[in-house]
Every structure is written in structure tokens, then in C-alpha cells.
Amino acid sequence: MRKLLNLVILLSTLGGVGSLMSFNGSEENLMMVREKSWVDSVFMSLTPDQRLGQLFMVAAYSNKDENHYKKIDQLARDYNIGGLMFLQGTPFRQAVLTNRYQSLSRVPMLISMDAEWGLSMRLDSSMHFARQMTLGALDDEKLIYLMGKEIALKMKRLGVHISFSPDVDVNVNPANPVIGNRSFGESKEQVAKRGVAYLKGLQDNGIIAVAKHFPGHGDTDTDSHYALPVINADLARLTEVELYPFRKTFEAGVMGVMVAHLYIPKIDSTANQASTLSKKLVTGLLKEKMGYEGLIFTDALNMKGVSNFYKPGELDVMALLAGNDVLLFSEDVPTAMVKIKEAIAAGKITQEELDLRVKKILKAKYFAGLNKYKPIVTKNLAAEIDKPVSAVVQQEIYERSTTVVKNKANLLPFRSLDTVQFASITVGVTPDNQFTRTLDNYAPFTKFNVPDRFAPDSIFDKLYPKLQGHDVIVVSIHGMNNTPLKDFGIGEGTRNFIRNLQLNGAYKVVVAVMGNAYSLKYFDASDWLVCGYEDNAVSQTVVPQILFGALPGRGRLPVTASETFKLGTGVSTPAINRLRYAVPESEGMDSQILKGIDNIALEAIAYAATPGCQVLVVKNGTVVFNKAYGHYTYDKAQQVTNYTLYDIASVTKVASTLQAIMYLKDQGKINLDERIGTYLPELRNTNKGGLIIRDILIHQAGLQPFLPFWKNTVGDSLKLKKTYYASEKTTDFPHEVIPGIYATKAMEDSLWRWTIKSKLISKKGGAEKYEYKYSDLGFFMMKRLAEKMLKQNLNEFMDQNFYAPLGLTTMTYNPLAKFPRERIAPTEQDKYFRNSLVWGNVHDQMAAMAGGVAGHAGLFSNANDLAVLMQMDLNNGNYGGKKYFKNQVVREFSRSQNKENRRGLGWDKMDPKGNGPTSDLAPPSTFGHSGFTGTCAWIDPVNKVIYIFLSNRVHHDAENNKLVKYNIRTRIHDVVYKSIIPKS
């Protein structure tokens, strides 16, 4: 509910028009006078033929040729048609053509569209919100209102006045081939509530809503586009079910209603006469019995449900005789005009009756603002139609509608990531898809893909041996259709495969149906079943988030799919505090401002500050920005992706060693104010033995800033000493420095000995404490302490207790043991020690000598996994339903320790004096770290912001300081803060 409240606030801040003004009595009377004056003046200016033209709304396309456009020109200019219904095309071309046609019309035309799920129903490159069955699964109608509002604002910007929505058909027939998921569902009450919310969203924002398809198209198994469907219901049944939502929309003030092409013999038994042409239905039932006084539209008159039986012109006359006001998709306006005038002359209909309908149309034009018509401004059209705030509504619809249909033993959301072997099988989609990319954000998956959803059993048979050893298999079905007679596009091979997997007791099979809810009947035997309702980038992002508990499961089935899965079925699943992925506006950030990151990142690449990078931003536990730029190297041989691993250098200090130290402190196993010699006896009789752990962590213990121990292992001309290195890996030389150079197993002992023997810096002027000097040696010592107390190697401890449980697939030491080199960005072209390109091995020389695992360096990761770890710290150890720290240890460690030193315990901090490692806009409580290779991770506990920047700026020369020179990291951090929308 908090998210929805935030969304409403955000929309009111960013989103255009609010609800229509409320007027007192005198103001309302004044408006009625002005409306009547305009309507009467326009009406009186028209000839009888021009008035008849107002009754027609013809089809227009923006993707056809000039011949089509000229035909519309003629109808607008010579026949004074009342409106256009735009069909396929593009927004910009439609706007240009609308201006063209309106310029030729004596009276500005009403422009209409079918936009049930947004402009994308008819126009390319437009936002798809959601089909109405998806909306039917929601737990709150407010989002439907907001969707209606957003669609209305887009339509107004495009010069459209009428939306042929909502569809308030009660879909009681699962075999319905034309309505199906265009309906809100099978409950008349839910259809009515959702229909009213939708129409209010449209009309409160200036768009005429049209409820359809009267008297109800939900109980048919025939598509009226191709034939005339038969409804064998009597008036009592229609009144009880189908008419209920229409009554509610009439009470709510819906301005238009569309009459369907249906044959209802128990109401009107005239052979082959559709309801559109039935006076008993349109006039008798709709206008007289139900008292509807708004605009009445025919359904499209080119549809075979009516056009198979009557000629153009005759059909138009019959529709008017039935009581319709607007003739939609008339196929021959000139002929129809002649036939209408003949009907008037024959006394079948009077001019006065038609004049009243023309005035109704003119009133609608007044409501639409056509009394003050202005051409569409085409400048910035695309940007102003597709405002980012719409994506907030779009995503939250899928977040709240996705339905966990079955969840045996509460397997969902997945909790234990380190004890489960996951596999995913995507069917009916390409291997590179948003569904599997999102799964990868949470856990390691073995991925399989069957692009053909009608693949035979023989294709699926090849997968069985490959799946052995896995525990949980997520099968997602994509590319479905909405045709019951075609099994909703799910092949028999797919169904057999899932059934066989379920029969194998070794697997927990989670089926994600990314399509029509009626198809769930094929998966009655499923123990774990999720319905995503639709298959698009947003739904493919949302469903995995629910599987892993980044989002709760809240949806309920709006229809009965089978005896097992009935209306209202749905299991509520909790959110367990994992990272969510959504648009910036969902968390109060401006995506247009965040685009400024692109410019800075590309500037860094253009100026050779780094060949490539990853940038990630988290706000309130939601990843709002995650982007990769550039290439691995300057020769541009391989692009950086979000899956690329970077050497994070000194960020290792806080992402590995410090986590272990905080764990020990949390467990009460170390005292930060104790001498390090207490825990490491070998230091007791050295100059290090009396150093206080707290002082070491804040770099104020007198340790040398930098000691190039690698120089101890080379001779003259920097030639490697055979005492320390060999060219082949053996038991005596097990530590890979780079391929072809292996360090002795005694190397870590040597490094430790040299560390112990190193001198301390002098205290200034007899000061009591050492001054602040940043040093790697302290964390080399902290690793030793941690391993001693944990009785386990640091890398093993971190993997078992943090990385694997958190699902951090890429966060690892020595990544070449797990990943191909192509997944890892190279670092320096080392010309003084390793004499090679360092690629897949740690760049830091001391860490490399120690076998790739050190306390100060050695860790690799992508931005996403590092963000997960940082979010766990921001949550003080709470993530994914697990507590990694029992006490407020992160808060303790992240506080500044004294006035002379900005640092926390291990953590670096924002410098209150300015020009520090963070943005100066960050609050003083910000903590994190940066790394020599061109990396940083910053956590802001006030604004709940995490900022990750990973690069390989040391490629190919470690002396390259342009990243700092041009303030790339801090300037990007500035953009992050500037993008936060101030709270009103």
C-alpha cells in the first residue's frame, strides 16, 4: 500500500491533469449555456447533408499510402464526416495526418482509437500497459484509474478524444475467441468495479470513454469479426449478468457505449440481424429500458458479423433505424448518405431524429475541447507521450497482478540459495530474454532454451540428462496466444515435458505461465504455479522478482481456469527484502536526469579514462539504474555487459575482510579496543603487537602506506627469482600469479614475515597517536586475524556465509576457476613484474603473490552482486529473509571514529570538508570504499541510496589517473543526488 500511495503522490507531482474541476451551480449553468451556444451555432451553420456527415466515423491508418490519405481528405472535405477511428500506424505519422485531415474539415472531427491497453493496441513504438484480464487480477482498482489517466494524457497529447474502452464484457465462456483476456474476468461485480475505475481515469482527464460491447460479448464461442455470434440468453439472464457492469458504468457517467454484433434470438429473432441493427436492443433495451442518454456507437460496420448480410449503405441506415448515433467504420460514406436521405424521404426516420443525434455528437466535441481546436504540436511528441511516470503505473500493475496460483509447502519465495541447484528452461522465446536475465540477478542458474513452443518430444528429450543434479527447475512458457482452439499456443511437447518433470520426484518444478490465465488448466498437476498473464519485458522482470521475494505475490485469478484453479485462486507470498528492479520514478528519482550518467560515462571512455564501466544505482532497495558502457579494451574487441566481472581492488577490504571482522564483532569474538597481539601471538614481541584493532581499521595505527613486497622476489633487471616462482603449477608452487607464473606455497609466510618486520611511521611532534595514513597492510593483518579466529580461510568463509547465501554468482576470488576469461575485464599491461596483460588474475601484486586471496584486494564482481552485498549492509545484515548480523554492527562500524579522521571502522566516509571520494551532495553518514582499478561502492543510509561504479581504468597503464582528474566517479554520484525528486 505504501508503494501505491507513493505512486499516487508521484503522479500528482509529475502527471499532468488531475480530475475534472468541480463546479458550483452557477458555474455549471454557465458552462451549459456556453456549450449550448456553441452547439447551436455550429449546427445552424451546417447544411442538412453536412449534418448527416457528422454521423460517420471512418477508419484511418497512418501506415498506408497516399491514395488512402487522399480518400480520407475527400471524406473530411466533401462529406464533413464527424470523426475518424485511427488504426495501425505510428504516433508521429498519426499526428501529422490528424493535423492534415482536421485542416480540411468544416467542423473539427472527433478522433478515436481502440486503446484498451494503451496506444500500443494500434500504434507501433507505444507503451503497452496491460490487458484487462491482467487488471482483473489486481487487488486494488486505484491502479486501473491511474492507468486510465495515463492513457488519457497520451491520447490528448496525440489529439485523440475518444477511447473505445473499457471492455465490460463478463467473460463467462472460457472458449470465447474474441474477448477472453480483453475482459476483466468472469465476476460481474469485479468487471463493473474495474470498468468504472478505468472510465473515470479516462473521463476525469478529458477523454470520452466508451463501454463495450453492449449487451455483453462474454458468453460466445464465435468471433464477430468473422461471423455472427449467437447468444442464447434471455432478458432475465442478461439483466442478471451481462447488463450489470453496463448499468454501473451508466451510473458512473460513461459518455459512450458501443453496441456489439451479436444475434440474441430471445430478444430479437429477426434472422441474421445483429444486435447493432436491432431496434429492440438499441432503442428498446439500451435507451428506453436502461435509460441511457449518452453517445451510442456501432461496433465496426466492416465486421463480418454484419457485413456478410447487408450491403454498405443499407447497413448504415439499419444501424440508424435501430437507434445508434455514430456509424463506426462505415465502408461507403457516399452511398450511405444517399440511402439515409432515401430513408428520410420514405418516412423511416425523420430529419429531427437525426438532428438530435448530430447535436449529441457536437456536445461530445465541446467536451473534447474542439470548440477551441488547436493543431497537434509535433515537436517533442514522442518524449511527451511516453513520459517515464507511465512506466511506474505499468510496472506496478504487473507487480500487483501476478498470481502465485499454487505454492506447495511455501517453497516460494526461494529462500536458501546456497543449498539449491537451480535450472531454468524458457520455452517460446529467444535464449537472451528478460526473464532469465532477471533470474540471474538472484541466483546461479543453469539455463536451457527451447525457442519453439511447438517443439516435439524429441527436442525436450535431450534436456532430461542435462537436468540431473538440479533441485529446482523453473519452466517459463512464452509467446502464447489467446486462442482456446489452439491451446493458447502451448504445444503438446511442452505440456508433456512439464508433466514428465513433475512425475520425476527428484525435482521441484515451478511453472511460470506468461500468458492467458485460461491455459492454467493444462497444469492442474503443478505444485508450484505462477501466472504472469502477459509476456513482455515488464512481466518477465516481475515474475522472477516474485519467485525470489523481491516482491510479494498478491494477485488472484479473475477467471476459473479449471476445477482446480477457480475464480479468486491465489496464494499470498511475502517479500523477503531482496533487491527489486524498477524504473527510477517508482522510487522518486528522475530518469531524465539519471540519463546524465550516460554522458559522463561516455566522456570517460572518449577521454581514455577507462575503456568501459558498469554503473548501478539503488534507491530504497530498488535497482533503478544498471548499465554497462564501452568495451574491455581500447581496441573495442568485446563489449562490457552487466555480466562482466571487474577486479574491485580495495573495495575487497569492505566487501570481504571487513564483513568477516564485523561478523566476529557481532559474535562477540573480538574486542576492537584490544591489542592485535592478543589474537595473533606471533606479533606480541614486535612493533605490531601493541597496535589497537580500532586504530588499524581507521588507518591510524602507524602502518606504512605502501610496501612493494613484490620487489623482494625479483632480481636484477626485474627477473623473477626461482626461489619464489616457477613456470608450471606444482604442489610446491600452487599459487597462480598469472598463467605461466606460479608462486611458492611459502609465499604467504614470506609476505607475513615482511609485514611483521616493516617499520612503523613516526608520530608527529611527540603526538600521542599516529596520524591518518591509508595502508593496505592493516587489512593484510585483519585477514590473518579473521582466519585465525574463524579457523577457516577467508575466501571459503565468505563464500559459505555471505556470497553463496546471498546468491552472489560473480563475487569471488580467482574468477578463472569459475568463469571463462571472456567474462572478466582485463587490467594492466604489466611491464615491470608479470610482463603480461593481467586478465582474470588480481591486479594487486601483493594479492597476486598470495594466490589471489588477500585482505586488501583480490575480489572480483559485477555491479549487481556488489550492490546486493551493500544492500545487506544498509539493512544492517538483513537480506533475503536471513539475518547475517544479529546486532547493529554495520552502523557501529560505519560511524566516524574521531574528528581528525573521516573514516569509519574499515569503511571510508564522505569528507565533510568537500572534494572527498563521494559526491559533496552525499550526507555525512555515507560510507563505502573505492578501489585502485577504478571502482567504488557508496552507501547512503539517509536517502537509502547505493551507488556502484566498476571500471578497469588501469588498462592498459596503471598510471592512468584520468578517472580522478576528470572526477568521473564523483560527478556520476552528483547526478544520482540531483535526480532525487524533492518531496512536496
Image: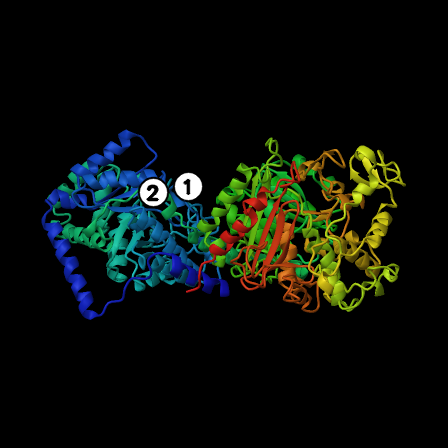
**Residue 125 tag number:** 1
Which residue is farthest front? 765
Label pair 1/2, CB-CB below 8 angstroms: no
- Taking the spot 67% from the left edge, 52% from the top edge, the residue there is 651
Q: Residues within 10 Å of mark 1 (few under 14, many from 20)?
A: few
User: Label 1 is placed on what type of residue?
Assistant: Ser
Pick the front one: 977 or 415:
977
Quarter residue 843 falls in: top right
User: Label 2 is placed on what type of residue?
Assistant: Gly
Pick the front one: 514 or 593:
593
**Residue 886 tag number:** none
The answer to whether 278 appears left or right of 132 in the picture is left
* Alpha carbon distance from label 1 to label 2: 31 Å
Residue that carries the numbered disc 2 in the rendered image:
305
Pick the front one: 754 or 330:
754
- Taking the spot 27% from the left edge, 46% from the top edge, the residue there is 111
Residue at disc 1, secondary structure: loop
Residue 213 at what x, y percent from top left?
Answer: 35, 52
Q: Earlier in the sequence, mark 1 or mark 2?
A: 1
Q: Residues within 10 Å of mark 2 (few under 14, many from 20)?
A: many
Quarter residue 403 falls in: bottom right
The answer to whether 511 appears left or right of 683 in the picture is left
Q: Which quadrant is home to the C terminus?
A: bottom left
The answer to whether 324 appears left or right of 697 in the picture is left
Residue 221 at what x, y percent from top left?
Answer: 43, 47
Residue 241 visible: no
Residue 171 at what x, y percent from top left?
Answer: 44, 54
Quarter residue 529 falls in: bottom right
Residue 620 visible: yes
Look at discs 1 and 2 and give the one toward the viewer.
1
Residue 760 at what x, y percent from top left?
Answer: 78, 57
Residue at disc 2, secondary structure: helix
